[in-house]
């Protein structure tokens, strides 16, 4: 077994102040260059890269050993730090190099199937298959360290605020929380199943009943749902709950947490208090309950202007209870060809929109896709409603409100991205509050919770639970960063009778309520403090702050889009012996 050279420094921390020092480094060979009498290697560890040098002043055996080195060999070296004659401004250690007088090869490496460099253009599945190589990249090491620092800061902050970190169970009872549960068969109780938690929601509420007062946890959660860039079947939440609080208490604490996080990890000053928007205002102005406020293009209602305009597409939408709204792409009309507009029209069809009307405002005229159906005076009135000027482009959608909001919400952000208006140096945080408590599902003919069934209705709206549940507002709040939801929470229901009423409004029978939530309602019988909390998506937050496009870039061992671990091969078939023991029969299609 090779001797181990005891490290004195990390590669990336060396600089001119170390010149003359003898150091011991351990790491991987990034690359080697043999110039005959000199061998140069780049040595890499998680902190960075430094150049090491072997010359013919060293013993012949050492020089020959150095000549054997290849990419990704793991080595230890001892040598003297010297100033480089030819500086390398591309790396932090570019002013110095190490002249080696001792070398140990700990292990050799075959030619890696992927390059260990940040700009390696290789498929994601190949990166995930060889994740242990992918994680050696400088960018990935930085992401992992950033995530570590975020978790440490989070624990330190909430500890100082009197929160207690408590683990909640991973094997729980299946409960409806909006997505499919992952089920775990019980061998001891055959024919019965645990579920992996979608969140610790009911357990953290029971901790409030237990008198814990302030709870938090950095916790794994599981949802069996279709994946996308910011979803994984297993993900991490920063989860917290507080007793004897109202909305302002929760938001004030979270603002101080976010301010400290951005300052210490990003050196970004966040001005408090953060802006607050009601759900209705967010939808009216931005077409989204996750508004991106880094740019304009706000929605403008045209209902009053066009309700009697004679253009059937507009008038029929309003007559049927729908909406006509638009956005003004100020000053960018010349950036959009007719082909571009046709493509945008196709893209909003996924939201249910049947068409996209447009107006081009030019110096002396207004051109429109619907000009032959509407008089010039009405066209001018529409333009005036947007304060339109020459070279403005107005895009209009008509239809049911949800379709209009979804379509224009997509368009304003998609167009801003194409125009390069999404400034990644801006961090626009805001709260969205006063969400509807329920959504009505037309297909299933029943109400669903907008957040979850434990969210408290606003006090003044409880009487509407019987007459018009869709009008009930919730004591709920989401924190949004640049058009992405970082987290959300609510003041919870702490009265068992009100909680049962909410369950009933959602269409649950007394038997279903008792079966699924009986233990929570039982706990509520014995004195429950008012309480509320919030959960952040840690993966999503790390992704945004690391300026990555996928949460897979900030998770050490993520699943791919098919929910598979390419490295380990999970999920895989279970042995017949194990299935027999669990009394499970599989059916292959």
Image: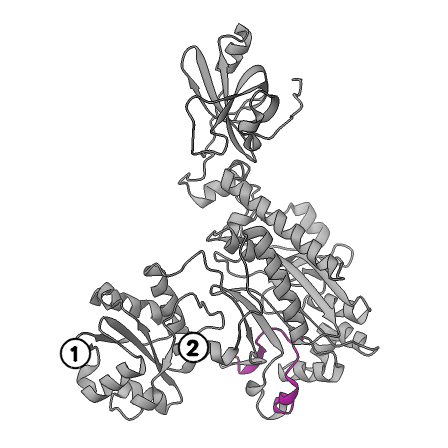
Mark 2: give few (<14), some (14-19) or many (20+) Cα within 10 Å.
Answer: some
In the displayed structure image, the side of residue 449 where residue 529 appears, left or right: right
Q: Which mark is residue 365?
A: 1
228 part of magenta stretch: no
Residue 36 in the image: x percent, y percent? 41, 11
Q: Secondary structure at mark 2?
A: helix
Q: How many marks?
A: 2
Q: From the viewer's side, name the closer residue of 36 and 523.
A: 36
Quick one: which residue is furthest to the left in this view? 364
Residue 186 in the image: x percent, y percent? 73, 57
Q: Relative to 206, does residue 103 appear above or below in the rendering?
A: above
Q: Quadrant of the N terminus?
A: top right
Q: From the viewer's side, name the closer residue of 546 and 1.
A: 546
Q: From the viewer's side, name the closer residue of 335 and 584.
A: 335
Distance between the alpha carbons at the discs numbered 1 and 2 = 27 Å
Please indicate, yes or no, whether residue 583 appears anywhere in the rendered image.
no
| Quarter where residue 489 is shown | bottom right
Residue 200 in the image: x percent, y percent? 69, 64
| Quarter where residue 104 is shown | top right
- For the point 57% across and 81% down, which residue is it? 447
Please give the residue where the numbered disc 2 appears in the rendered image. Answer: 285
Q: Which residues are magenta?
A: 444-465
In the displayed structure image, the side of residue 253 where residue 357 appears, left or right: left
- For the point 55% across and 52% down, which residue is it? 267
């Amino acid at each position: 077994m090779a001797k181990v050279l005891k490290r004195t420094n990390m590669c990336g921390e060396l600089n001119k102040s170390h010149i003359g020092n003898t150091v011991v480094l351990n790491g991987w060979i990034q690359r080697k260059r043999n110039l005959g009498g000199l061998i140069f290697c780049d040595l890499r560890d998680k902190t960075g890269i430094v150049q090491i040098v072997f010359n013919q002043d060293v013993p012949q055996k050492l020089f020959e050993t150095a000549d054997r080195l290849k990419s990704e060999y793991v080595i230890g070296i001892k040598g003297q730090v010297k100033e480089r004659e030819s500086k390398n401004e591309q790396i932090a250690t570019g002013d110095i190099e190490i002249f080696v007088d001792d070398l140990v090869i700990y292990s050799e490496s075959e030619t890696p199937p992927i390059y260990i460099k940040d700009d390696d253009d290789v498929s994601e599945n190949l990166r995930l298959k060889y994740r242990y190589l992918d994680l050696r990249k400088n960018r990935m090491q930085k992401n992992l360290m950033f995530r570590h620092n975020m978790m440490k800061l989070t624990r330190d902050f909430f500890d100082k605020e009197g929160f207690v970190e408590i683990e909640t169970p991973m094997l729980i009872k299946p409960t409806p929380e909006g997505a499919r549960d992952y089920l775990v068969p019980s061998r001891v109780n055959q024919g019965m199943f645990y579920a992996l938690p979608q969140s610790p929601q009911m357990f953290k509420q029971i901790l409030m009943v237990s008198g814990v007062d302030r709870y938090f946890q950095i916790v794994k959660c599981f949802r069996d749902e279709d994946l996308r860039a910011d979803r994984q079947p297993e993900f991490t939440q920063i989860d917290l709950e507080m007793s004897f609080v109202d909305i302002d208490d929760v938001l004030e604490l979270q603002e101080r947490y976010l301010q400290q996080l951005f300052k210490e990890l990003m050196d970004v000053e966040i001005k408090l208090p953060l802006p607050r928007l009601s759900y209705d205002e967010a939808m009216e102005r931005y077409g989204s309950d996750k508004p991106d406020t880094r740019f304009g293009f706000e929605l403008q209602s045209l209902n009053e202007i066009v309700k009697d305009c004679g253009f059937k597409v507009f008038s029929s939408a309003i007559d049927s209870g729908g909406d006509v709204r638009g956005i003004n792409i100020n000053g960018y009309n010349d950036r959009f060809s007719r082909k571009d507009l046709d493509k945008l029209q196709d893209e909003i069809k996924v939201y249910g929109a049947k068409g996209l009307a447009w107006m081009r405002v030019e110096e002396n005229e207004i051109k429109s896709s619907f000009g032959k159906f509407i008089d010039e005076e009405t066209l001018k009135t529409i333009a005036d409603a947007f304060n339109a000027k020459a070279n403005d482009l107005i895009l209009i959608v008509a239809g049911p409100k949800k379709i209009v909001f979804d379509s224009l919400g997509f368009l304003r952000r998609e167009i801003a991205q194409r125009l390069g208006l999404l400034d990644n140096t801006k961090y626009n945080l805001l709260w969205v509050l006063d969400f509807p408590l329920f959504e009505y599902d037309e297909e299933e003919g029943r109400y669903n919770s907008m957040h979850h069934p434990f969210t408290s209705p606003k006090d003044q709206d409880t009487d509407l639970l019987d007459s018009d549940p869709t009008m009930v507002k919730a004591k709920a709040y989401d924190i949004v960063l640049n058009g992405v939801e970082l987290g959300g929470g609510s003041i919870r229901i702490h009265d068992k009778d009100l909680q049962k009423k909410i369950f009933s409004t959602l269409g649950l029978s007394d038997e279903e309520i008792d079966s699924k939530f009986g233990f929570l309602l039982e706990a509520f019988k014995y004195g429950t403090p008012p309480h509320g909390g919030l959960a952040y998506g840690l993966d999503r937050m790390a992704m945004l702050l690391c300026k990555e496009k996928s949460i897979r870039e900030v998770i050490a061992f993520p699943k791919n889009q098919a929910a598979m671990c390419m490295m380990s091969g999970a999920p895989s078939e279970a042995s017949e012996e194990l299935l027999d023991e669990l009394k499970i029969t599989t059916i292959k299609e």
